[in-house]
Structure formats: structure tokens, C-alpha cells
Amino acid sequence: MSLDRMVYTFNSGIKQVMDRMSTSSNNLANVATTGFRAQIDSLRSAPVVGDGLPTRTLSIAASTGSIFQQGAILETGNNLDVAIEGKGWIVVKGADGQEAYTRAGSLGLDIAGMLQTQQGQKVMGDSGGISGPITVPPNTTLLIGKDGTVSVSQTGSSSNVIQILGRIKLVNPPEKSLLRGDDGLFRLPPGQTATPTADVTLLGGSIESSNVNSIEEMVNMINLSRQFEINVKMLQNADTIAGKADQLLTFN
């Protein structure tokens, strides 16, 4: 391998190792984040395009994917906590006003009584094909059914009257179509929305933990650190070889 090709190869290797370390660090930082899906990177080699550069090769990111394996279900006893059993997503309203999907079922109410996630995204309901945030009346006890039905009873009342407010919009789009946003929410490609389904089941009084395996991520970080050191050492070797070559040319 010529020196210039060596420099291109290992320099690109350093960049990609640093990107993968960033992904692994993000996974470790979200070990305790409810419903978080671990990220994975895939790489591929690509030729450098340009005049006089047909033999140089770089490694580039082919895609950034997610591991959709379900995390552990933790019982909380809180009637505002829900976990999805199996596949599926809770529909929320993103900061851009568009439909987004989350597995973070630790819910709460804002000052207006709207059902929202702990991150402040409004939980969307679905009633007769019409979607909108779910608003809970004051002085009521909230109940969330397995099918996502949201109902309330009057707090402190001896009456058993239950008022149904709506149903949380639950969807199950193809996982390969989902795109992760910078806010941690998943979305379908622009212009697409998922159809509500009755196949998604909620487990009340529980939340789903992150599916990040902290031990695997720590081992991965150690391996990446070693790869980084190897790439740096190879660049240093290339610099040493170039220096020796310059000396020989000078003597000649």
C-alpha cells in the first residue's frame, strides 16, 4: 500500500471510529431512558472521487439503524404509566407539529389537563379517524385500558360512573420504515402517517426500560478505543516512513 493510500485509509478509519464511539456513548447515556432504542452503525468502503485519486479509499457510514428488541418491563403501580407489550408505538405530537412515535409510556398531565409524555409531547388520541390531544377533566381519576382507552371517574365520588375520553392512538408501522429524529422520536418518511391498529396492547402501571445492554456497550467502547489507537499508530508509522524516504532522497 502506498503512503498516500495508507494515509487516506487510516484517516478515514479514525473518523468512523470516532463516529461509532459517539453512537456508543449516546447509547450508554440512555441506559436509564424509558423506552429508548439502541442505535447501531454500519459502514462500507468507498473510492475517493477526483482527478488523480482513483486508488484512494474511504470508509463511510452506510446507515444508522436501531435495535427494536423490547426492553424489560418494570412495574411502577402508577396509573399514568403504560408499557407496550410486544411491537407497537404510542403516537405523540412532535415539536414540528407532526405525528411521531415513542415507546416512552411514563405519562403525565400538563396544566391544561392534556395527556403528555415526560418530555412534554402531547399524546394523540384517535376517535372516529380524527386525531387530537387527549384532555383530562380536573378532579378525576384517570384509567388507561389495555387497548389504549382513556377513561375517568370522579375523584371522591361514590358513583361508579365512568366517562370515556377517547383512545390513545396506537400504531405498528414496519420498523424498517421508521426514521429516528434528533429528539429521539421515530417517524415515517415525510408525508406518511401510520394507521391506528387494535393489535397493540398496553400494560398499565408499568414502563418499558431502555433496551441498551450496558455491558455490551462498555466492551464495544474498549474495542473502539483500541481501534482508534491502532489507526493513529499506523498514521505515525506512515509519517516515519515518509521521513526516512525524504532522508534517502536528500542523501542521493
Image (cartoon, grey):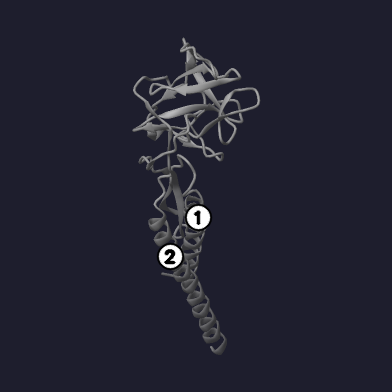
Identity of the residue furthest to the bottom in this view: 251
| Relative vertical location of residue 31 with respect to residue 199 in this rendering, above or below | below
Disc on res. 222: 2
Residue 198 seen in render: yes
Q: Residues within 10 Å of mark 2 (few under 14, many from 20)?
A: few
Q: Residues within 10 Å of mark 1 (few under 14, many from 20)?
A: some
Quadrant of the rendering where the N terminus is positioned:
bottom left
- Say what amino acid the circle numbered 2 marks: Ile
Camera-side residue: 1 or 65? Answer: 65
Q: Residue at x 35, y 41 (%)?
A: 69
Upstream in the sequence, badge 2 or badge 1?
1
Residue 193 seen in render: no
Spot occupied by residue 151 in the image (x, y as percentages of width and height): 48, 17
| Relative vertical location of residue 159 with respect to residue 218 in this rendering, above or below | above
Spot occupied by residue 36 in the image (x, y as percentages of width and height): 46, 42
Q: Residue at x 51, y 55 (%)?
A: 22
Disc on res. 25: 1
Identity of the residue furthest to the front in this view: 158
Q: Residue at x 36, y 19 (%)?
A: 198
Spot occupied by residue 181 in the image (x, y as percentages of width and height): 53, 38
- Say what amino acid the circle numbered 1 marks: Ser
2 and 1 marks in contact (CB < 8 Å)? no
Camera-side residue: 123 or 218? Answer: 123
Q: Residue at x 42, y 19 (%)?
A: 196
Identity of the residue furthest to the right in this view: 111
Q: Secondary structure at mark 1?
A: helix
